[in-house]
Amino acid sequence: MNFGVISNKSKDPDRKLLDFICEKIINKNGHVTFAIEMDKHDDLNGVPLSDTDLLISMGGDGTFLNIARQTAEINIPIMGVNTGSLGFLSAIDIKEIDSAMDMILKKEYSIDERMMVRAEIIRKDKKTEFFHALNDIVIARGLLSRIVNLKVFIDGAYVDNFPGDGVIVSTPTGSTGYSLSAGGPVVDHGLDLMVITPICPHIMHAKSFISGPDSKIQIDVIGKGDFSCILTADGQLGHELSGGDTINVTKSELSVKVIKFTGTALFNTLRNKIYYRSGE
């Protein structure tokens, strides 16, 4: 079995963890196709991904999201190994690598197919940019503390105006990220749907909305003059928006395969990594 190992350089500056995992793979008769370090925004151009059966992402959620977006078209399964503080998307912590490698080589695991979303920006009736995201698309105010006004439609039907800090459109995977912090629901990661959650809305009745996987979510940026508003994909890719811009969000044609082991159910992870954090 061929493994590609990608390590977050900032969390493993001396390559000790990277070398440690590679040694484990080789000792268990696996083959390391490549072993690289990468910064948050490094790309994987030139890496022999097509010869790889499984990717190991070493770092936190940001590392996992970056790798997932870049490899979604190839659709290689990814196993997250948490070397950070939270690692909600990771299947295991670094101390569990021995048992995890045994299960991988014995094929004692399952694969979750995670949906992604696609956002395209329309400016003056022309498509200018598009982004894919595993976690979420966020339209939010910029550096200045000014309210942005966003008008939301689902399948052409007007939902509401949301003056405030912005709006999040998340996948089920992203429902336990920024959307959760903004008051959105926890969604089973295996479902196909989208969650629309306003951020700090300046109205009394704002709640999250859930739409189906075939829905088209339209968000209009309302306003003129000098104000700051940006779109981000997974908190890593960004584009500045202007008044009059429209953002269309739909289910992406891409998806991400995530390695899952017995005992790593969503609600176990919630208890261990989120509910108990207040006691840290």
Image (tube, rainbow, N blue to C red):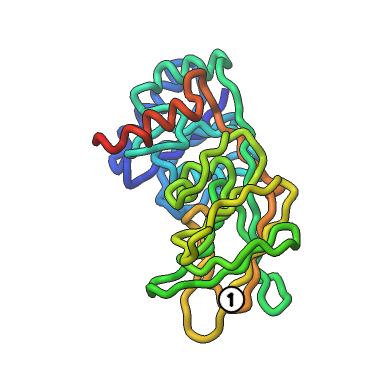
- Between 47 and 171, the one nearer to me in the picture: 171
User: Which element type, helix, strand or loop, lies under badge 1?
Assistant: strand
- In the picture as drawn, the residue positioned furthest to the bottom comes out as 225
Q: Is residue 13 left or right of residue 146?
A: left
Residue 129 visible here: no
Instruction: Give the x, y percent position of residue 102.
Output: 47, 15
Residue hosting label 1: 222
Instruction: Give the x, y percent position of residue 184.
Output: 50, 47
- Quadrant of the frame with the N terminus: top right
Against 110, residue 58 (above or below) is below
Residue drawn at 56 percent across, 19 percent down: 109
Residue 150 visible here: yes
Against 135, residue 164 (above or below) is below
- Quadrant of the frame with the C terminus: top left
- In the picture as drawn, the residue positioned furthest to the front comes out as 204
Against 35, residue 123 (above or below) is below
Q: Amino acid at mark 1?
A: Ile
Instruction: Give the x, y percent position of residue 119.
Output: 64, 59
